[in-house]
Image (tube, rainbow, N blue to C red):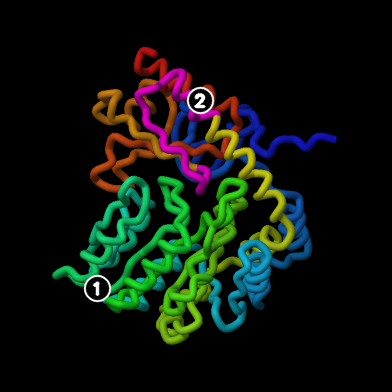
Amino acid sequence: MRRMAILSLPESVLRRRTSMKWRRYGPDVLPLWVAEMDVTLPAAITNAIVDAVEAGDTGYPEGTQYQEAFAEMARARWGWSPDPLAEMARVGDVMNAMLALLQGLTDEGDHIVLNPPVYAPFWQVIAGYRRHITEVPLVDGRLDLDGLRAAFAGPDRPSAYVLCSPHNPTGTVHTREELAAVASLCAEFGVALIADEIHGVLVDPGTEFVPLLSVPETSGAFVATSAGKGWNLAGFKGGLIVRGTDAAEGLAKLPPLARQSTGQIAKIAHTAALTHAQGWVDDLMAEVAANKDLLARLLAERLPEVVYQRAPGTYLAWLDCTALGLDKPAAHFRTEGKVALNNGADFGADYGQFVRMNLAASPEIITEAVDRMARSVGR
């Protein structure tokens, strides 16, 4: 019996949802913006949540089940075996983890390095907590190692470098050699290395994702991660900080409440995802890969001016709309095409001609979105 596609929910069903993706804009706007997926949960996750609620297991979280489930997934999927007891701390979510690490490892007024275009909340959490941002943009979609060295050695010596891996919004998957080079630079200049790996399981079939802490040179680094993105569990706040083998002192510097913000149901849901739904996320990414191919074909046919560099990471597409000659592409497509996309300027001031598109949707919705975009510019 053929399996029903994961990304097959029709718009009529999705419109019943009350989450941000489907309620931020009006019913005439097709939303392909924020990183929510148009999926239903794997049965194992749903059953774990229902069982907990029916049993009244809704108190405060306890135990290391989440950490142990992540460690087992890391061993089976990536050949990496972090210690779930000594090297992990449970936290509220990845951005809470990033905040805790920045508060523990850096001081107000410090400089933090980012690689634009990069996930918008990074800018917000750094600037909002009185740190300064040093930009080292990607070059042709990849890390600029020479640029990092110059920034680390420059007059505004940074105390930390926040790495997005896989990179959001471009979908770049960093190589083992790139990660080792980054770690060596951080060690040479005494820069704390902090990575967001929430998209780690979200790579195309056959693509190798390299966990930062599986690289020997990264023993002093920290990773923030979560099952939230891979299994569409943003509504269940939970995450993990994983430290390098030589970074125990840094983990001890976390703010006192940082480890108390995971919810009990989140712990249960994320643990079920990591333990029982590995095949589901692999099937999902096979469908996302097909959607990337679909988008490339649709753009070539309907909007050839839009540049799309297909990348193997995430379910997001980064589109350069410069050749369309629009003042603000994201605003234009939302108001004139009735398609909501992320504004590229939110990922870096120089990227206002870009938009980010969410491809964790049915092929029918993606096709309709590109049709609307094309019609909005007279194609």
Up/down of 28 relative to 14, above or below: above
Q: Nearer the viewer, residue 245 or 107?
A: 245
Q: Secondary structure at mark 1?
A: loop
The x, y position of residue 167, in whole percent, is 43, 52
Up/down of 182 relative to 339, above or below: below
Residue type at the position of mark 2: Arg
Q: Nearer the viewer, residue 368 or 336?
A: 368
Left/right of residue 172 with respect to residue 291 in the rendered view: left
Residue sitting farthest toward the left:
155
Residue 109 visible within the image: no
Q: Residue at x 60, y 79 (%)?
A: 83
Q: Write down the region rendered in magenta.
A: 294-315
The image quadrant where one finds the N terminus is top right
Q: Which mark is residue 108?
A: 1
Q: Residue at x 59, y 66 (%)?
A: 263
The x, y position of residue 144, in whole percent, is 30, 56
Magenta span contains residue 295 = yes
Pointer 2 residue? 297
